[in-house]
Image (cartoon, helix red, strand yellow):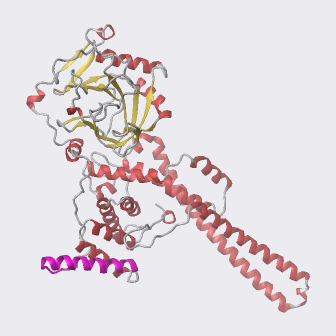
Amino acid sequence: MLGWLSITGSNRFFRDTRHFKPCGTKKVIERDKMRKFLSFIIWALLCCCWTTQAEIFTSISQMTDLIYTEKELVQSLREYIQAEESKLAAVKSWADKLDALTKVSTSDPEGYLAHPVNAYKLMKRLNTEWTELETLVLQNPSDGFISNMSIHRQYFPDAEDETGAAKALMRLQDTYQLDSEAFSKGKLPGVHSNAILTVDDCFDMGKTAYNDADYYHAVLWMQQSLKQLDGGEETVVSKEDILDYLSYSVYQMGDLPRAIELTRRLVAIDPSHQRAGGNLRYFERLLSKQLNELNQDYQPASEEPIQLGTYIRPKDHLPEREAYEALCRGEGLQMNDARRSRLFCRYQDGKRNPRLLLKPMKEEDEWDSPHIVRYLDVLSHKEIEKIKELAKPRLARATVRDPKTGVLTTANYRVSKSAWLDKEDDPVIDMVNRRIEDITGLTVDTAELLQVANYGVGGQYEPHYDFSRKDEPDAFKRLGTGNRVATFLNYMSDVEAGGATVFPDFGAAISPRKGTAVFWYNLFKSGEGDYRTRHAACPVLVGSKWVSNKWFHERGQEFRRPCGLTEVD
């Protein structure tokens, strides 16, 4: 990130709010400066003309004033030229850097964005750095450039996108247990990349967490920013700013001794830092009170460099968080020899379905109970590309149903975009629907439309049920087709790392394999929900994950899947 493109500062404990003029205001200010400068030149020249007409030439003494006026104008002009050259050099440096970057990114866009650091930095560049570049260029407006910026700006990511991408990186960090240093160097499992996070990138990551009151991640990324700065890396952000954020975040994590140590070092660097002085006195009083209660003395640390702390990640809303994330990493799998011996592969003709007799489907057992199967060669590459082509213009943020209101809404635990495709949209969709019906033996007449989903950086869907539970009886009332009886999930891409479908209740993990599909029943034959089928889509660590799914409903399946006689049939 270029020095002139960075903005730092925010509110925090004992902080004065730092106000920044919005971009539009900056443009007005720069234009006003330009107008004033030009007005000054015109005024000076007019003065010269007017005084000449007033016979200044008749007095050398008066003419000497014009000499100094001209000298002042030339000096102002030199300063203007120097400022323009400096600005142009900065713009040229930025253009050269982006030219090299876009050559790499456009050669394989999906492959480039498959690395989450690249995706995050793209969000950051377009939301923050290009705006700063526009402001710089507006100091001497270039109509062509500004016109282009105005046209494309409507498609740029906004601050919410940049924040979302930063949080996605933190989500990946937690799920796959990646340390900040490895992440900042682009070192992901099985991946070698030149995608790196600079001191300023790490600082911005920490600031994103800080502004969300996520002090755990704020500490992780502020520490990494400090470590890289102490390692001699060039930076725009100051050590004082890093220590300012870090010390308060450490305090929020309950580590008073280290908060004091960090704040003391901040005061040592900048003794006039009024906020740091107030914080230090407050922290010391708190610690003194705590130690007095324990009859202990405080021993200040004196090690160099600053010792980095290690903290425990706070618990959140998800009860099976640890089991879910372990499965995403390939840990905690409950597959054993006894269970594996009950798994088979076979040719499946859909109970002698005419369309599958000559070319039966290859079926593999993924799990015995509940029974989960995988079908091979369900979708061809050509069909997948057509489905993606139809879905891309319609992709919108995926939603979930609020269990209390029944209203569809977005949620942080489902990060993807989806589109719904009808058989009327293209013959390929009708063909795929018919093939799914042949394979499963269930009618698609009462099924939902084919849902296509694409997961972006850190894309995920935390553990959830596909069927509606007893506490949300009206979830599918408007459809009039009953509950979701089964799920058919097509994998339309391979994923380099992450992105598995996991079942925390019984410890299963199913990896995406392009062209294959997995199928399971959400309800017992009695109509009762099978709560073991609670599943999740793990965050995509590296790659672009495309899936499509068909949700079957109860109505219309009466003779295709008859009811059972007991609750767990």
Q: Position of residue 141 (x, y in %)?
A: 66, 59
Res 190 quadrant in image: top left
Asked if residue 294 is among those painted magenta in the image, a careful observer would answer yes
Q: Position of residue 91 (x, y in %)?
A: 57, 60
Q: Nearer the viewer, residue 187 or 296?
A: 296
Q: Main secondary structure of the magenta part?
A: helix
Left or right of residue 505, residue 101 in this image: right
Left or right of residue 29, residue 128 in this image: left
Q: Position of residue 396 (x, y in %)?
A: 46, 38
Q: Nearer the viewer, residue 42 or 367?
A: 367
Q: Could one spot residue 500 in this view of the protein?
A: no
Q: Nearer the viewer, residue 35 or 186?
A: 35
For image coordinates 49% across by 46% down, the residue present is 103
Placement of 389 over or under 329, stated as above or below: above
For image coordinates 12% across by 79% down, the residue present is 295
Res 461 quadrant in image: top left
- Region in magenta: 274-300
Quadrant in which the C terminus appears: top left
